[in-house]
Each structure stands twice: as structure tokens, then as C-alpha cells.
Image (spheres, rainbow, N blue to C red):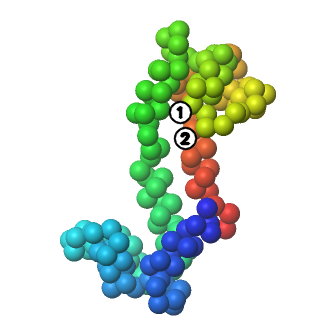
Amino acid sequence: NQHQLECAFKLYDHDGTGSISQPNLRKVLASLFGILPDQCETVCASCFADSTELTCQHFISLYLKSVKAAGLPGLEDLRDAFDLFDSDKNGSLDLSELLHAFEQCAPSTVPRDRIEEVFHIIDANGDGTIDLDEMIQYLAKSWTDGFNLAR
């Protein structure tokens, strides 16, 4: 969220000026992440293409842009989990399969009515089942919405 990204910015803005210089970015990248000098130059070139200082809003904008460009993480794991929960192997999940998945995997008890509500949201075409594409579309939208910060 916005607050977390502002806190991350402060990690780079260790002198409290409200902006990050190229030398400061290089120091942080090398010390925290072990990034090699040639990799630092690549990062700096993309971060400082339009300016010599990186403001908090520009930092957040660049971060969100790179996260969105990377795509939905864990897609292969999602496919594997979907296949595992598809107990009748018909390529879709019905409500009973989703309920069973929650019973087996949720770290705490989720009320049945909440699972049914989520099921109907994910079942975009209303056919009473969730196929892999519907699941991916729902998760991708949820994931992307998480990066649409209020400004």
C-alpha cells in the first residue's frame, strides 16, 4: 500500500532530503541487495532517465510499473493447485470442490456463505463452475487492484 512504499522510499532516502540521488541508490542497491556495479548502472539508467533525483512519487510510480510488467507471480503454482482441487478432473471447480479446497488449505475457518460469495464472484460467466481462466482473471484483477494506490 501507499504507506509501505513510502517507508521503502525512506530506506533509500537515508539522508532525509525527500529525494534519492544516483550515488545513494547505488549504495543501497549494493549493500542491501548485493547488486553488481554494471547492474546498478542499468537500474540507475532507468530510474534517472528524466531527472538527477528520484522523488517518492516517482519511486512509487517506477515500482508499480515494474511490478505490473513482471506479471502475476506464481501462475504455474496456481495451475498446479487448480488441477489438484479439480477432483473430478473436468477442467473446472464446482462449489463443492472449492469448499473442499478451503477446508483443506485455509489457515482458519472461512464461513461457507463467504466462500459461496467468492465462488459467484469468480464464476464470471455464471455457469456454476470456475474454470482456470476465470480463476486467473479474478486473481490477476485482485493482484493488479492491489497496486492501484489512491493518490
Q: In the figure, is residue 40 to the left or right of 75?
A: left
Residue 54, image x and y in percent? 46, 80
Quadrant housing the N terminus: bottom right
Q: Position of residue 46 (x, y in %)?
A: 35, 70
- Taking the spot 22% from the left edge, 74% from the top edge, the residue there is 37
Mark 1 to mark 2: distance in Å?
Answer: 6 Å
Please tell me the numbered disc located at residue 62: none
Determine whether label 1 and label 2 are within 8 Å by CB. Answer: yes
To which residue does mark 1 refer? 136
Residue 129: x %, y % from top left:
63, 17
Inspect the image, locate mark 1, and give the three-letter code of the amino acid beneath it: Ile
Q: Could you tell me the amino acid type at mark 2?
A: Ala
Dividing the picture into quadrants, the one containing residue 130 is top right
Query: Is any part of residue 45 visible from this angle?
Result: no
Check disc 2 and report the residue beneath it. 140
Q: Residue at the location (32% across, 81% down)?
A: 27
Image location (x, y in percent) of residue 104 = 58, 26
Give the residue drawn at x 68%, y 63%: 150
What residue is drawn where x is 53% and y is 27%?
A: 133
